[in-house]
Image (cartoon, rainbow, N blue to C red):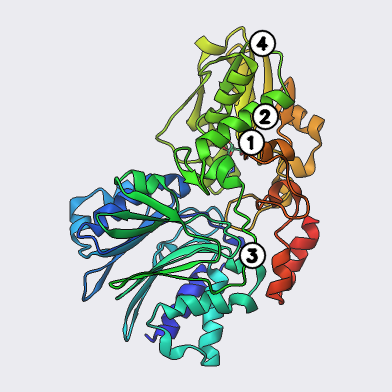
Amino acid sequence: MSVANEFDKQADNLGMGDTLREECGVFGIFGHPDATALTALGLHALQHRGQEAAGIVVYDGKRFHSERRLGLVGDTFSKRHVIERLPGSAAVGHVRYSTTGETILRNVQPLFAELDGGGFAVAHNGNLTNALSLRRQLVRDGAIMQSTSDTEVILHLLARSKRARFVERFVSLVGLTNKKLVGARDPLGIRPLVLGELDGAPILTSETCALDIIGAKFVRDVENGEVIIIGEAGIESHKPFPVMQPRPCIFEYIYFARPDSIVGGKSVYQVRRNLGTELARESPANADIVVPVPDSGVPAAIGFAQASGLNYELGIIRNHYVGRTFIEPTQQIRELGVRMKHSANRAAVAGKRIVLIDDSLVRGTTSVKIVRMMREAGAKEVHFRIASPPITHPDFYGIDTPDKDKLLAATHDLEGMRKYIGADSLAFLSVDGLYRAMGHEKRNPEKPQYTDHCFTGEYPTPLTDKTGEIAPRQLSLLAEAS
Ligand code: 5GP
Ligand code: MG
């Protein structure tokens, strides 16, 4: 099969288009004898970014080898024979998270194509679907046919995706050819990507926790719009995009990243504690104890408890052997998932007025269950505090926030939400409270410091001017969001 066809096929496989939203984790390493095992470990640390599937592609100097499977990293890559099947000193890996895309093997990354001049593997975090279609377009135009086997493909893809639609460029990725490891971060720096190093071998990965697990050194964040090319000769940095003010996704700090990661120079754990502190200041509760909704609510609950002088208690016990609830495709199974995941700890909550802290409220599924569970366990009063503002707008940059009509805060006012989840009181952190937790005085309305459209409805619009063409659906999403 020709290269173009292979890419077409892969683009089509991923091309469920707008409905396929992914938030993923990537890891790449160049020039290390244990590249595959290190990539497997890195992906293991990034497991929270995607539990649906995992894949590694490695190059041994002559051939590419790949293993891509549905399931957790450990299901596949903890096995010695699997690692041994993947010899080589340069590797890229991916953990995939998807809710709406079909759970099928051919969607599993890294995408890989064996080309005439060598192989090419790419693993991305965010939605590259349309960039691949764009490439198909470019190939049809005859634009870059001869460079398909080179890292230039990625450069062209990204640099020329000016013609592409708005969302397409919100992707960070790692790619591997027979000569180079490539990393690219989107022009607004929405998704994170960091550069690290182990025994002289450069690493590109989504979060610093993937460096820590293997004892690698953090070198620096990859900058917004930066493309890094790593080869035998060393590390090159390119800036193929117009310079823009970075607008990293604020939801990485609230929910997505692991708390021990440092994202954009900030400790995620510290930010989450601050969220709880700000929340306690803005919306204190008359209660006896603070109870986190584990695990995502834990750091904010610690902050809330410290700021309010209330005892912190483990009123809910989490079963760690169940995946994140959003993974399950149907509402029915999702509800089952929530019950499987959390249990009430009666000894801590019976007879108490409790403040429940969670990081965010999306559909309300978790909150409804948890409030009921706390009452059944004998809690006298249940006050719910959410350590982020109401999510009123859908997301299409990578994090799975459902359609607008499924977002509780898009369809209910505060009192309506309180009733829906059955709490005695309910409060959310304000947008400025969120920015204070991030170390800013407040949100800059002219130039917002982060991508925060789930809360504000303000999509990073400056980009639309620069990108020119926007597809009708994109426009309708933007219109609906405003
Ligand atoms: P809800 O149950 O209200 O639909 O969702 C809220 C819960 O889902 C919170 O506990 C939060 O930690 C988690 N959550 C928030 N955003 C996301 C996301 O994008 N993906 C997944 N898997 N969980 C999320
Ligand atoms: Mg949670």
Q: Secondary structure at mark 3?
A: loop
Give the label, 4 or 1, closer to the camera.
Answer: 1
Q: Of label 4 and label 2, which has the lower sequence position?
A: 2
Instruction: Tell me the residue that label 4 is attached to.
Output: 380
Whether ligand 1 has any atom under 8 Å from the Cβ at mark 3 is answered as no
**CA separation, marks 4 and 3?**
52 Å
Q: Secondary structure at mark 1?
A: helix
Q: Is residue 245 visible?
A: yes
Give the label, 4 or 2, closer to the camera.
Answer: 2
Please rate how many residues cluster around mark 2, counting C-alpha atoms within 10 Å: few if below 14, some from 14 to 19, many from 20: many
Point out which mark residue 244 bears.
Answer: 3
Give the label, 2 or 3, closer to the camera.
Answer: 3
Query: Which residue is at a point 53% across and 18% down the rendered structure image?
Result: 315
**CA separation, marks 4 and 1?**
31 Å
Instruction: Tell me the residue that label 2 is attached to.
Output: 278
Assign the C terminus to one quadrant of the image.
bottom right
**Is 204 situated above or below 229?**
above
